Structure formats: C-alpha cells, structure tokens
Amino acid sequence: MSPTTLAGLLIGLLLLSAFFSGSETALMSLNRYQLRHKARQGHRGAMLAERLLQRPDRIIGLILLGNNLVNVLTASLVGAVTMNLGGPAAFAIGTFGVTFMILIFAEAAPKTLAALHPEQVAFPASMVYYPLLKIVYPFVWLTNMAANGVLFLFGVRAGETKLQALTREELRTLVHEAGGRISGRYQQMLLSILDLGQVAVNDVMVPHNEIVGIDLDDDEDEINRIIRTSEHTRLPVYRDTIDNVIGVLHLRRLANLAQREVDKARIESLVDEPYFVPESTPLSTQLVQFQRRRLRIALVVDEYGDIQGVVTLEDILEEIVGEFTTDPADADEDIISEGNGSYLVDGTTNIRDLNRLQKWEMPTDGPKTINGLILELLETIPEPGTCLEIEGYPVEIVTTDGTRIRSVRIGPRNLPA
C-alpha cells in the first residue's frame, strides 16, 4: 500500500478507537434522571441511550469488542510496516509511537471531551450502537457469557439495571445544586417540603396558653366581643379551660351576627366535633390527614391526653411557603433590632420562627421557645443580667417575671476560628 493509503488507514483506525473510548465514557457519565426526563420528552438519542443502559453489560461488551479490535489492528499495522521498513529498531520506535498516539488521540482526549459533554457524545453514539448491537449480538453474547461467568464466581449477578430511588438527603443535594435553574424562593419551598417529615405538629402549633377560643362560662358580651374581633375563622369552644373542649366553631355559620347577638345555646348547637392529634405527628402525615378528613384545625394532645396546643392547615402551609397569615407587626414586636447587630427577643418566640426570620441556627431538637431552651440549659430561672452562649450566640437575660423569661438580648454569632 502507498504511504498515503497507510496514513489514511491509520487515521481512520485512531478515529474509530476515539469513538469507542469517548462514547463509553459519555454513556457511563450520563445523569440517569436527566436521561429519563429527555427520554420521556421523546428525544430519540435519549430513548436509545436509556435502552442501551438497561443492560450495561451488553453495551460495554460491544464497545470493548470494537475498541480492542481497532487497537489491535492499529498496532499490527504499525508493527508490520515498521518491521518491513527498518527491522527491530524501527519496530520498537513504531510501537512506542503508536502507543503514544492511542493514549493521547484515542483515549485521553476523547474521554475528557466525553466527560465534559456526555449528552452531546452519548446521544449520537447511541444511534450507532443500537443497530450495531443487533448485528453483532452473537459475538457480544459470547463475550458477556465469559465475563458474567467470571463475575458469577465472585457472587455478582448481571441483569437489568433499575433507576435507584433517591433518599431525602440526596434530593436536598439536587435542589441545592440546581443553582440558577430554580429561584431561591422555590428552592426554599422544595427544601421545606422535604423536611415536613422531620417536623412534628408540636413544632408549629399554637401553645396551650396562647389559644384563642370561646369560653361558654364567660358572659355573652365577652363571647360576642371575641367573635367580632377574632382574626381566625375557626375557634375552639370550651367550658372553663381549653382542656374541657366541646368542639370547634366555624364563624361563617354565624352569618347574621351583624343583625343580632349570638347566644351560648346557638354557639353550642353549631360546633363541630373536635379532632385530636398526637403531638409527635409529622407534618407530612398531618397534612394528609387534614386533606382526607377535610378539616383545617386540630387539637394537639400529649401522651396523657392533655391538650398542648392547636395546629391548623395554615400552620403547616407556612412551613412550606413562609409566613403569610401573620401580621408583620406582630413579628416586629417579638424581635426588635437594636441597631448594633443585637436583637431584643420575646421569651415566648418560637425557635424555628426565629431561625427562619433571622437566618440563625439555634438548636430546634429540644424546647420550642427561647424561654424553654434557656431554662433547659440553666436548669433554673435566671436573674436579669445573666449571660450565656447558645451555639455561638451570646444571650443576655433582660427581664423575667419569676416563673419565666420575658425577654432576652441575642448578639451576633461568634464563629469558631
């Protein structure tokens, strides 16, 4: 053969080797979830790639069969030519030269390109491999039989691969890594949804001492005042204390309130049966329960059956989308900036709300309020002026009332060096 023919043949073999090497890396580097998404959208290259990757042993066998065949032919061609031209010395130089060319042009460069742009390489290659696999399947089958036999000796069983389900933490990582593809607001909402199963109703409920309801032991003027000024559409109805709850009143049933006063008998006849939930119920479970029962409010009880608070559908939705029913002025009254990086915080402030509003990292795996957290750490009711540090945040007790901490001052976090 003429030198031109030999050079063309050598270049063609190197290109084939580069194709096999690069496409192997590209197929194995594909994001399986993006691949499935594109396949479901009807992308032909993605559909063929997904089918090929269902049996990776077959496509790997095909690629290795073609790649090794091409590399052997390349080495044999160069060896024969150099031996005829210059004997053993030329053969040694030719062997070194072809090894270098295969390493650079048929392995390193195409594999790097494929790793950087897997879809652009894998999808066109799949259109070649899919029909080629059917043509040379007997040879691939023999290769796989031998390879699978070796794996069988080590306890490995080859078969179809399935897309593995992602764990909650893996999904969180995917959402974080979405970057500019998902706005920060939507990212936070998705992360909140993933965390619903880790948050219990007692983390978001209105505590026992803050429940607004109708006490039938009050006089009718007081009851009518509560109904007129209530910010809620559903109110618990009880006698003497919330522990003696009778039911839940939907204020829309009092449509004629503007025309005449509402008496106790009418209220008692309109209440719905109370719905009780354990305080440890995950928010994800409670959300489903609200949907199934077509309810929007539940009374939270502890292991002894005592009422600990009230949780509503709005409380759960606010865990996902953030505050939307609370007057911003209320939050400003609980957390007051002092202008020097410190904040004056009400002792009843919920720690989860504080972390969300201030982007802090106070511990939430114990008490639910600042007051409870400090009392747990100190195991006593501190005097005003007492200082401590919680997770790097300097905390100063500002006021107490003998039984609880009324307000604290929290300074900027001291990060470890």
Image (spheres, helix red, strand yellow):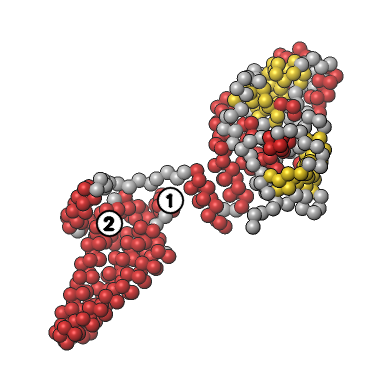
For the point 22% across and 62% down, the residue is 65
Using the numbered discs, state the Cα–Cα distance from disc 1 to disc 2 in whole angstroms: 19 Å
**Residue at 78% in and 41% down:** 386
Is 96 or 311 nearer to us in this picture? 96
Reading the chain from its start, which is encountered first: label 1 or label 2? Answer: 1
Provide residue 171's location: percent of width, then percent of height.
Answer: 50, 47
Question: Which kind of residue does numbered mark 2 sit on?
Answer: Ile
Q: Nearer the viewer, residue 68 or 118?
A: 68
Element marked by disc 1: helix
Disc 1, disc 2: CB below 8 Å?
Answer: no
Q: How crowded is mark 2: few (under 14 residues within 10 Å), some or many (20 or more)?
A: many
Residue 322: in sight, yes or no?
A: no
What residue is pinned by disc 1?
33
Query: Circle 2 sits on which residue?
Result: 59
The residue at 18%/75% (across/down) is 76
Q: Is residue 93 above or below residue 206?
A: below
Residue 409 placed where, x, y %?
78, 45
Quadrant of the rendered image containing residue 179 = bottom right
